[in-house]
Structure formats: structure tokens, C-alpha cells
Amino acid sequence: MKKNILLFVFVCFVNLLLGSSIFGQTAPPTPNPQFLYYCLNEPAVPLVATPSGGGTLRWYAAATGGTFSTTAPTPPTATAATGTPGSSPLTYYVTQVIGGVESTPRTEIYVYVNQKLDLFCQTITPNSIKFDFANTGQSSFTYSYTVDGGTPVTGTHTAPSNFTVLGLNEGQTVVFTLTAVGAKTCVTPETTSCRTTCSPANIKTPDFPAIAPFCSGSVTPILAPTSPNGITGTWSPVIINNTTSGSYVFTPNPTLFPCATTQTLNVTVTPLVTPTFTGIPATVCQNATAPILPTSSSNATPITGTWSPPVVSTTVSGPTPYTFTPNPGQCVSSPTTVVTITVNPNITPTFTQVPAICSGAALSALPTTSNNSFTGTWSPALNNTATTTYTFTPTAGQCATTATMIITVTPNATPTFTVVSPICTGTPLAPLPTISNNGYTGTWSPALNNTATTTYTFTPTAGQCATTANLTITVNPLRTPTFTTIPATVCENDPVLVLPTSSSDIPAITGAWSPATVDTSVLGPNDYVFTPNPGQCAATITQSITVSSSNTLVDVNWTVTEAFAKNQIVTINATAAGDYLYQLDDGPFQESPIFENVSLGPHSITVQDKNGCSLPITRNNVLVVNYPKFFTPNNDGYNDTWNIFALQDQSSSKILIFDRYGKLLKEIFPNGSGWDGTYIGQPMPANDYWFSIEYTEQDIPKKFKSHFSLKR
């Protein structure tokens, strides 16, 4: 059994005002509870009990034990709580305290939450209908029912929780009302209706034809009270609404046709549509390609029709209305729709003229929006080197013509200047002109320089369409005259020397000397100044000429380091003092009188006056005594024997040769042929060999020992 719960809250009101004696020192009598009823989920209020004067209430959840609360509880109503008094699951207890003494026993308060009836048809047959309902906590009811709207039948009912109406025919409708009897007034009466079933053979279905869709606002068809197959009845709604789609239900007469079914007709009312044309532009440009007028609108359900005039003309500027007439049979809001197309005249974009520029000057990008607000692009690309005509092509759809602009590019001229003649180093330079010969103003850089050839750049003042110009000023360096024919020294009492007036340079530098001649009778140096003639870029020079004494070189002698020294040095001494050059053998003359590392043997020395004022003196037989460090006795004609030939003039000199063990191998003499590297006719091996020599140096007898190498 289906149970929709209706709550009754039974509140036992405890009368605590029965007399103060019940709250004295003895337990009060048990009060008789009273009950209130709440429905399921009905808002509840806190429980109420009235204490005696001076008493305070204590609330408990159980008859004994537990803790109390001084706040009255509010019973829950979300769950049904039924039963007889004293057995309810929702039971509360209350006492009062006076003078510190609590009343006993605790007084019960019962809370009942009852179910609603929840009346419904449980079992339906062709001849009966069984109604079911909830009777928990409720056992007494009254009922009333009608059959097909006839005379009501009434009565009372206790148990069970159902009631069956018998004696019915097929297709009859019973309207049944059930009311709970008693104080539980929150259980409201309930009514339901059910219809007995019909056997399949007796079921009839109305056969009204479907109603075709029609346009909103059209004259609607009339709903007939009798179907084509003869079933009478009523319609709901009775009249078809001609503006809104809806469903219309035909209910057969239950008395005449108890087993006839209802029929529902769904009526579609097509709303009126205003044709729209999203593809037709509101404006077009004059002489542009005309848009085609579509014969179907842009609506979700296109409207077809015709246009008048049928073709758009763009030859004449101004607005033109075009009327669209829908084809018959379409739900449109108006018999015609007018679309106005305005033909806009083509306008020439205007731009601020770009002033003429100089070739190479920067050109700002041309504006892509004209002064009269047309956008577009320019061609060709900007050219800052030649006068060019540029064409502005408007972006499509702007009703604008192309426009042109000529940007004049003035060629750059080269400023001209009078060439500045070459100058000599240090010659003053006049400022360069700031206005060219052809009228351009500007500045020069770098600053003037009269010490070096320099190229100067003329930068024209901005806005003159002129290029830079270069001017090179040649600065010739001062030439220093040279006189290769003038000696630095002349000899005493030589003929008077007349100084030349032309230098040895090519080309020669001419000028004059002061003094013009050299007096050779005056010994010592003297300065002579040569002043070049003007216009030659030549410097004045001073040349010193020394008059040297004649015949100062009288004699030459020399010294040599002792024989067999590692570094043989020859030192030359000339008398008297003078400025001399020294020579060893046929070598070059040098200013130093000392010659080092001189080879062994005889040499010659020569001394000459550097200035040629004395005759040179040569001395021979300068003897350097030393010994060969090695020899190669291989009969090739070179170094085949070993000897100290520098002492060949000392016939008394003697040389002894030993091997490294001190064995005497040979005795030779400086004026002899020397040692050939043999011993008793046999070649000696390559090795070091020792020797000793006895000789005389500056009349002093001396002896020297050393060694040499034999190489094979």
C-alpha cells in the first residue's frame, strides 16, 4: 500500500496549575495528558507547560535518568510518529522545581506525527473500482462518490484501508471523496476519480481528420461536436486560436459513448514572416557591378517572390526603392517588402601635397587614409631619387576613384669652387668661401691645415638640393737643399772654395750663401748659411765647414797581444794627433785603431787622414803568432800539414808533438814543412795531439804548450 505521510503532532499539555501542593515536599499527582496533532513537515513550536508560581521547568528525554534542559524542545515533524498514547516514539518529560525540590514523577508529553490519506485507485475492472488510502493512526472515515456525475452516494467507513465501488458498467467514471473523522483535523479530505475499463471490442476512437497548418491570423476551422464516425462529445479548448499553435482534446460524451477514447488534434499556426534580405547592400557605388536581387529571402524559412524593378541600376546616384512581392500561399506579415538601395557617387580621395624634396632626402610613407577619410594603398614604392607619380587605389567598397600625386625630386647639384693653388708648409691659408661659385651656402670641414695636404669637404646648408663637394689643398713640404759637392772639411791653405748657388737636388734649389766662399787660411769650423730663392718651397740651411791642418800624420806604430793569446788584438798608434781612419790588410777603413780576433801570420796596416790633408802611411810585417787548431792530412791540398809558420823567421824555434799519453811523435821547425800526421811512416788516427814550442818574443825566450786536432 502506497503511503504518503501526513503528520499529526499530539502535544500533551501538562496542567501544572492543579495546586501548589503538588510541588511541595511530596510528589505531585500524575496529570492527564491532552493531545495536539501536527501534519508531516508542518512547522512545529517549542513544547509548552505552565509552572506554579515560583516554579522553574526542567525538560527531559526519558522518564528517568538523563540530564535536563531548561529550554523547551521543539518536536521534529519530518518523520511519522504514530501509536497509542504512551507508546509514541516521540515522548517528552517535564518537571518543575520550587524551593530546590523537584516534582516527581516526570510528566509525559506525547507528540504524534500522522500520515495524510494519500487516496488513489488501486484496482480497476470493467465493473468495479477499488480505492486505497493510508489509515495509520486513523480508523474512522466518511465517504462520498458519484458515477458519471450522478447522485452522490455517501456513508461511513472504518477498516480496512480501502473501499470498493461495485455494480459499475464499462467506461463509467467514479469521483470518490474520503474524509477522516475525529479531532485530527490536519488530515484534509481527499478526492480522486477513476474510470472503469472497457473491453477491446467496445472501445471506439473518434476519427477527426488532422487540421492543416495555417498562417497566423487566418480564419480558423470550426471544431465539430461529432466525429466522422458518429461519436459526440466536447472540445477543450472549444475554439481554435489563430495566433498560437496548440493541442485540442475531444472528449466523447461519457453517457452515450462510455468506451470512446479521447482524440487530440495538434494545430500548427505558422507565424507571419517579414522577408529579410541580408545579401542586398544598402548602398552601392555608382557604376559598380549591380547586386543581384534574390528571389528567396534570407529567413530561416525562405520566402520566395518577385522584385519590381527586377534589376538594380547603378548608373544614377541616389536612393531607389525595390519592391519584393511574395508568391501566394506563404505566411508573410505584409503583401510587399520594400528595400531601398542608395547609389553613392564616386568621390576622389584628397591628400595634402608632399612638397618637393632633394634627391636622396628621406620620404615619409604616404598616408593610407585620405583627408576625406578614404583608405587604400599607394603604388609604386616611394622613390627619393626621381620625380614620380604615385597612384592611390581605394580599398574596395568605398565609392572612391583612384587619385594621383606627383612628388617632385630635385636633382642635387655639386657646389663649385675656385681651386686653391698649392702652398708651402707653413704658408698662411685664407679661409675657404662659405658660398660656392654656383651660389650654394654651407660649411667646410676639417679645419684648415697649412702643414699637410688635406681634402676639405663642403657640406651645403640643408634644403638646397646640393651634394657635398671636396677641395684638396696641396701643401708642399719644405725641401732641404743638399750640396754633395761641398766637403765637410777642407785642408789648410787649399785654394779658396767658392760655394755653389745651386743645390745637388733634382730639381736643383737655387739661392745664395753667406759667406759665399771658404777661407782656408783660418783653421777650425765655420758656419755657412744658404738662403733659397723665393717660390721653391725650400728651407734655409746652415752647413759647417772645417779647415783642417795639413801634414799632421808623421808616423805609425802598433802593438800585438802576446803570442798564442785566444783573442789576438792589433792596436795602431798614429802620430801626431789628428782625425784618422785605420785599415788592416785590404779590409775597410774604420775610425777605431783596434782590430780584434786577428788571424795568425803577417799582416799590413794603413793609416790615412780622414780629411785627406796628410799622406797615408802603410806598415807591413805586423806578425800575429798563433797555431792552427786542426789540420786534415788527406792530400787534398788544403791543411795537409800542421806547423806554426808565423815563427818561420826564428830558426832557433823548435816544436815537439806528442800523443795524448805524452809519447813524442815528431820534432819540427817553424821554417820547415810541418807534420804530415804520420808516425814512423804510418798515419795517426784522428784525435787530439799536444805540442810544445820554444820561441823568442821581444828578445825574451818563451815556451808555450797546447793541443790541436787531427781530422780525417
Image: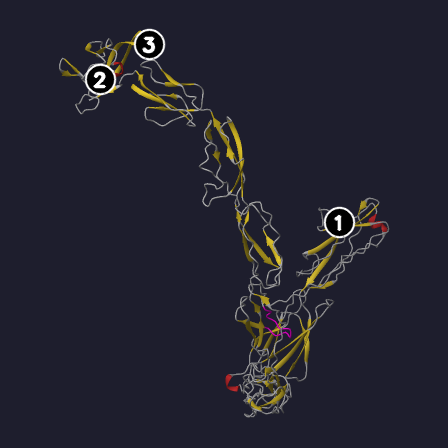
Whether residue 63 can be seen here? yes
Give coordinates of residue 457: x percent, y percent.
Answer: 56, 55
Position of residue 619 measured from the top left corner of the image (x, y, whole percent): 34, 19
Residue 128: x, y in percent?
58, 79
Q: CA distance from mark 2 to mark 3?
A: 25 Å
Q: Nearer the viewer, mark 2 or mark 1?
A: 2
* For residue 296, side relative to residue 65 (left or right): left
| Circle 1 residue | 69
Q: Nearer the viewer, residue 712 or 111?
A: 712
> Which label's residue is closer to the chain start, 2 or 3?
2
Query: Is any part of residue 234 visible from this angle?
Result: no
> Is 289 contained in the magenta span?
no
Front in this rendered view, residue 127 or 618: 618
The stretch of residues the image draws in magenta is 366-375
User: In the rendered image, which residue does mark 2 sit on?
Assistant: 642
Q: Earlier in the sequence, mark 2 or mark 1?
A: 1
Asked if the magenta segment contains residue 367, the reply would be yes
Side of 586 relative to 456 (left or right)? left
Please identify the quarter of the rendering in which residue 255 is found.
bottom right
Residue 589: x and y, percent? 38, 27
The residue that mark 3 highlights is 698
